[in-house]
Image (cartoon, rainbow, N blue to C red):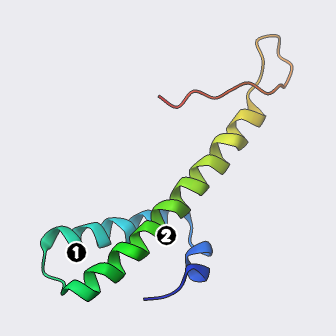
Amino acid sequence: MADAADIDALSFEQALAELERIVGQLESGQAPLEQSIELYERGALLKAHCEKRLEAARLRVEKIVVGQNGQAGVEPAEFN
């Protein structure tokens, strides 16, 4: 397993794809215990990375929302 430094270099899409792969491996139950623990740890780091990337994207969207009067402004973005 690689360390957290390489995770920081991943795009959201790359991190999510790897996280999905890890979840699949863990759900299959085929990995030995020690490998499962390592996969889980990396998955937790990938999850945190994805959450950080999503929050950054949310903040960027809030900055570019245009107000009703046509003036650029900052409004909370709704992601429901």
Circle 1 sits on which residue? 25
Q: Is residue 72 left or right of residue 31?
A: right
Q: Residue at x 77, y 36 (%)?
A: 63
Q: Residue at x 52, y 31 (%)?
A: 79
Q: Which of the pair 31/8 is nearer the observer?
A: 31
Q: Is residue 53 left or right of residue 80?
A: right
Residue 69 vertical position relative to residue 80 in the rendered view, above or below? above
Q: Which corner quadrant of the image does residue 49 belong to?
A: bottom right
Q: Residue at x 42, y 76 (%)?
A: 42
Q: Amino acid at mark 1?
A: Gln
Nearer the N terminus, badge 1 or badge 2? 1
Circle 2 sits on which residue? 45
Residue lying at the far top in this picture: please name it.
69
Quadrant into which the N terminus falls: bottom left
Q: Amino acid at mark 2?
A: Leu
Q: Nearer the viewer, mark 1 or mark 2?
A: 2
